Image: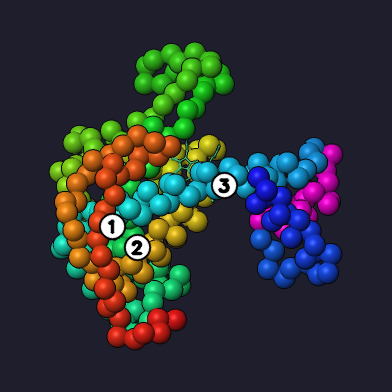
Amino acid sequence: MSLLTSSIDEHIERRRVKKSEKPDIVDVMLDMAEIGSAEMQVSRLHIKAIITDMLIAGVETSTTTLEWAMTELLRNPQAMSRAQEEIELKVGRDRMVRESDLVSLDYLRCMVKETLRLHAPAPLLMAHESTQGCNVGGYYIPPKTRLFVNVWAIGRDERVWEDPLEFKPERFIGSSIDVNGHHFELLSFGTGRRGCPGIYMGLSSVYLVVAQLIHCFHWNVEGGLDREETFGLTLPKKFPISAFPSWKLTTDDPS
Ligand code: HEM
């Protein structure tokens, strides 16, 4: 909490001198607090709660996805070579991948989708509750029913996916199935009004970090690369990967 207090104080101090030309989310919320509204007055406590919510919801989900993506790439050398070749072709070997490159890295994006299919960080999404009674598939669902969506099981259902336990990013090439909540076979970020608001930030950070890790380094794995999961806030690996990087780019200055 003291970290958040000092961050808000720093923003207020800086804004006294000059408002930022590139406001961040704390600036936006301080603007809302200054303007005020009849509907809701944003307070310091609201700002702290929202930042805490974002950190809790955004950090472990993204890092868990990243660790599973690296695990699957190291377990599947063909997928690793294909992802690396794509980056070398589109970016070259003399600089690091930039955010603006991501749009051209189709295989990389398919690979992250495939990781999310097999290893949804929120395997049961968050608990949802019906506000009104409704009929779904011939069943009456009373109001206030608690609902858990098992996206982990959907992602491994052989009625939906061919070879569901295989890691095959190719299955998404040319496929319209996406993680944006419109395709119920791949609901890694949930759907509808309670779906993840950080989807694009989460995806871009995973794309960028995986791309840089596999583009800048060769990886030597020590020990096994199992798929054991353990239950936590998300569904992380039970045993961490043990892999050692060695520099691969043709330049020492990767900027
Ligand atoms: C790969 C990364 C991520 C994954 C897989 C993920 C997945 C999810 C899922 C499954 C939910 C629940 C949706 C539901 O129950 O229908 C959720 C909620 C949420 N996510 Fe994410 N998320 C990711 C990254 C992020 C990031 C980067 C942020 C913010 C910076 C974020 C903020 C949130 C918040 C605030 C909620 C709660 C929404 C609510 O209460 O209605 N997430 N996320």
Query: Residue 189 or 216: which is nearer the viewer?
Result: 216
First along the sequence among labels 1 and 2: 1
Provide residue 120's location: percent of width, then percent of height.
35, 42
The residue carrying mark 2 is: 210
Query: Residue 200 or 50: which is nearer the viewer?
Result: 50
Q: Are marks 1 and 2 in contact (CB under 8 Å)?
A: yes
Mark 3 Cβ and ligand 1 under 8 Å apart: yes
Q: Is residue 34 magenta?
A: yes
Provide residue 146's location: percent of width, then percent of height.
47, 20
Give the residue at x 39% y 36%: 232
- Quadrant of residue 163 within the rendered picture: top left
- The answer to whether residue 79 shows anywhere in this view is no
Query: Residue 83 or 230: which is nearer the viewer?
Result: 230
Secondary element under disc 3, as helix, strand or loop, is helix
- Placement of 92 over or under 49, stated as above or below: below
Provide residue 254's location: percent of width, then percent of height.
40, 81
Per the rendering, the mark at residue 54 is 3
Name which residue type carries label 2. Answer: Val
- The answer to whether residue 13 shows anywhere in this view is yes
- Placement of 95 over or under 9, stated as above or below: below
Per the rendering, the mark at residue 186 is none
Name which residue type carries label 3. Answer: Met
Give the residue at x 43% y 43%: 189
Q: Which residues are magenta?
A: 25-38
